[in-house]
Each structure stands twice: as C-alpha cells, then as structure tokens.
Image (cartoon, rainbow, N blue to C red):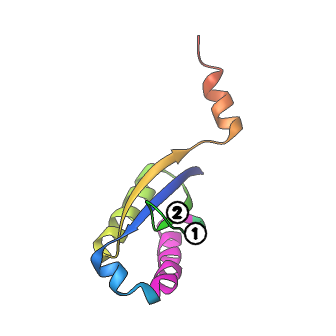
Amino acid sequence: MITYIGLLSFTDKGIQDVKNSTKRAAAAKEAAKKMGVNMRDIYWTMGDCDIVCVLEAEDEASLTAFNLATAQLGNVRSRSMRAFTAAELDAALAKLP
C-alpha cells in the first residue's frame, strides 16, 4: 500500500453544512474502501486546512479516482502528498550515489 497525506479545505457548500461533516467523512470512508483506498485516519484541524487524512491506496490510480469522486461532491478541495515511512525512505536513500 502507498501512504498519502490528504489536506482538505471546506468549500462554501461544505462549510454551510459543516454540522454533517463527520457523517460525510464516514460516507467518504466507505466510498474509499470500494475504490481500493483506506482512509486510515481523519482529523479536523484549525488553520490552513480544515481536515487532514492519512490514506493508503493500492496504487496512484485508485487515489486519483477517489480524489476526483470526492471533488465532484463539492464539499471540499483537496491536495494529496505521498508519504514515506523510514524504511521506504531508507530504500530510496540506498540508491543515491
């Protein structure tokens, strides 16, 4: 599995219905599962991002499809970053000259 960090911000539509945010997140978690993505952790935050997620995906296409499906709903805008464990980074560092 490939690990990603998702940074999400509410759209105007999403903040107008913020009371249902946890319910939407639970629905997103179920939809993600069907697309080969595991939403391992979901945190609501204060600051630049409204929600931070730790996601695991079988491949980049699965995460991309999930992100696009989520964007179509119009409640959040998202950015994804590939995350590496220490072991994964060590493997990459071992390839350096």
Report the residue that reaches farthest toward the front.
Answer: 47
Which SS class for mark 1?
A: strand
Residue where numbered disc 1 is placed: 43
Choose between 35 and 4: the one closer to the eye: 4
Would you place residue 36 above or below residue 61 in this image?
A: below
Residue pointed to by mark 2 = 52
- Vertical position of residue 17 compared to residue 76: above or below: below
Which of pointers 1 and 2 lies earlier in the amino acid sequence? 1
What residue is rendered at 71% in x and 36% in y?
87
Residue 61 counted in the magenta span: no
- Specify the segment rendered in magenta: 20-38
> Which of these two is toward me, 9 or 67?
9
Q: Amino acid at mark 2?
A: Val
Q: Residue at x 59, y 16 (%)?
A: 96
Residue 74: x and y in percent read 29, 75
Residue 25, horizontal then vertical, whole percent:
50, 78
| Quarter of the view holding residue 68 | bottom left
Distance CA(mark 1)–CA(mark 2):
5 Å
Tell me the residue at 56%/66% (across/down).
39
Question: In this rendering, would 27 be left or right of 90?
Answer: left
